[in-house]
């Protein structure tokens, strides 16, 4: 029997009244015939979902999509216009910075006050304080007014207070984004411990890797509506597609600080001529089968394209074979990518992503980042590009994205065609396993003689 939900959100909608200026708010309040000066804005529209004990639900969405409004309704900070949000149990929440803390009080006083709000006695909070103080790890500032804290120090204290009150539901709204990497890792481990103890977690983050690695489920909000609810990896792919569908027309020019310098046309042609410009391969590898029948093809791939170019086929080769169901860890892999151009592209960019089955990126690169310039592509031309990579990976399932873009001054270029998770790569273990984890980074043990 499935446990009853900790969170039940049923047909929740939230409407705000927006005024062009404060005086129009006053005019509407005092108008004898109740003339309306505002216009309505629906931050949420008919949202429904459940969260059960032990579930970690990630919420994705662009700024203004309604994520924070939804969390505030779940926490009871805000009431919905329509619908209902119910929570069965104790809620601990990290919403926007500063929420719930008195800036004049010290961190210690705020922790005790937070505990009182959660229903704990002063005696009980004093018993928990040493553990909270140790987790926050801000030293003598724990006894200084919160108004003197940096954003990182505030998050440390707020998170430490939230996780040590035995919540049935923990709500985190992007608060960890301001912490340093070490503290973020510490928090993520603590979140996993809370989940293992049976608590539910609602987690908002713009980090797709955090969502795919931490969450058991994910949802997408777009313009106040719930547009996707499912497995984190699938939802993350859909979110990327949503972002690209809006950003394809946004072109950036110039060189960004810290990026490789842009290549002028003269330098570009000179570099191509010095490398020969292309790779000669045996055309017999292109058998007369559709891409859907290629070994490793993932029929659940997600595609983003603007029609400027099309990745029409690929072939994987390992140990001289193109028909392998899997490869042994450490095998050298070659991928040939066939692309057709529907427009002339002066500086094409070809790239790839290698990810785990949970969507965590192991490596991502392209010809621009690797400073491997490609020849000018004419309208209607078909080109074949080659990618060589090693696979020092642990046994398991991996996925490869393939993409083609054109140079626009950014590291990734302007997307022409991206086929996410197009290749399902199965790695089998070597006879004698030498490491745990994902990647063999290359290591050696030794003993120093005395």
Image (tube, grey):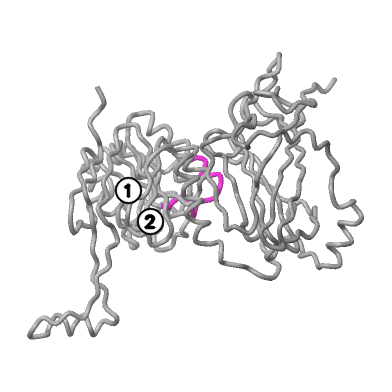
Residue 101, compared with residue 435, is above or below; it is: below
- What crowding class fits label 2: few (fewer than 14 Cα within 10 Å), some (14-19), or many (20 or more)? many
Residue 113, given in percent of the width and then of the height, sits at 27, 50
The magenta segment:
174-186
- What crowding class fits label 1: few (fewer than 14 Cα within 10 Å), some (14-19), or many (20 or more)? many
Q: Is residue 432 visible?
A: yes
**Residue named by callout 1:** 93
Q: Nearer the viewer, residue 243 or 142?
A: 243
Counting residues from the start of the chain, the first of labels 2 and 1 encountered is: 1
Magenta: main secondary structure equals helix
Residue 437, compared with residue 186, is above or below; it is: above
Mark 2 touches mark 1? (CB < 8 Å):
no
Residue 413, given in percent of the width and then of the height, sits at 66, 59
**Residue named by callout 2:** 222
Q: Secondary structure at mark 2?
A: strand
Quadrant assignment for the C terminus: top right
Corner quadrant of residue 386: top right
Q: Residue at point 73% right, 38% down?
A: 335
């Amino acid at each position: 029997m499935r446990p009853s939900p900790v969170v039940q959100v049923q047909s929740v909608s939230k409407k705000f009244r927006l005024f062009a200026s404060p005086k129009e708010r006053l005019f509407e309040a005092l108008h004898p015939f109740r003339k309306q000066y505002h216009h309505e804005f629906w931050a949420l529209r008919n949202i429904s979902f459940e969260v059960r004990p032990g579930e970690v639900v990630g919420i994705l969405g662009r700024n203004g999509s309604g994520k924070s409004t939804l969390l505030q309704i779940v926490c009871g900070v805000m009431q919905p216009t329509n619908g209902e949000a119910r929570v069965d149990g104790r809620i601990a929440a990290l919403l926007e910075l500063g929420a719930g803390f008195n800036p004049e009080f010290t961190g210690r006083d705020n922790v005790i006050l937070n505990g009182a709000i959660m229903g704990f006695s002063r005696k009980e909070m004093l018993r928990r304080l040493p553990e909270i103080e140790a987790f926050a790890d801000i030293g003598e500032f724990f006894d200084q007014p919160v108004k003197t804290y940096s954003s990182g120090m505030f998050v440390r204290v707020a998170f430490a207070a939230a996780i040590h009150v035995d919540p049935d539901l923990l709500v985190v709204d992007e608060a960890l984004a301001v912490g340093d990497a070490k503290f973020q890792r510490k928090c993520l481990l603590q979140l996993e411990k809370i989940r293992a103890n049976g608590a539910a977690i609602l987690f908002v983050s713009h980090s797709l890797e955090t969502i795919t690695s931490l969450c058991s489920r994910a949802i997408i909000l777009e313009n106040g509506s719930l547009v996707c609810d499912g497995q984190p990896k699938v939802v993350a792919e859909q979110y990327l597609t949503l972002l690209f569908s809006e950003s394809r027309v946004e072109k950036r020019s110039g060189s960004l600080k810290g990026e490789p310098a842009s290549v002028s046309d003269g330098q570009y042609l000179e570099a191509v001529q010095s490398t020969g410009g292309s790779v000669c391969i045996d055309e017999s590898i292109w058998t007369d089968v559709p891409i859907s029948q290629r070994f490793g093809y993932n029929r659940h791939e997600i595609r983003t394209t603007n029609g400027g170019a099309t990745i029409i086929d690929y072939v994987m080769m390992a140990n001289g074979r193109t028909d392998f169901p899997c490869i042994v860890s450490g095998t050298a892999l070659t991928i040939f990518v066939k692309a057709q151009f529907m427009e002339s592209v002066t500086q094409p960019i070809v790239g790839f992503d290698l990810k785990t089955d949970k969507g965590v990126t192991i490596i991502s690169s392209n010809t621009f980042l690797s400073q491997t310039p490609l020849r000018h592509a004419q309208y209607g031309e078909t080109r074949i590009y080659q990618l060589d990579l090693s696979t020092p990976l642990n046994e398991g399932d991996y996925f490869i994205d393939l993409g083609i873009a054109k140079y626009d001054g950014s590291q990734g270029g302007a997307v022409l065609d991206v086929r996410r998770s197009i290749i399902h790569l199965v790695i089998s273990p070597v006879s004698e396993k030498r490491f745990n984890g994902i990647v063999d980074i290359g290591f050696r043990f030794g003993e120093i003689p005395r």
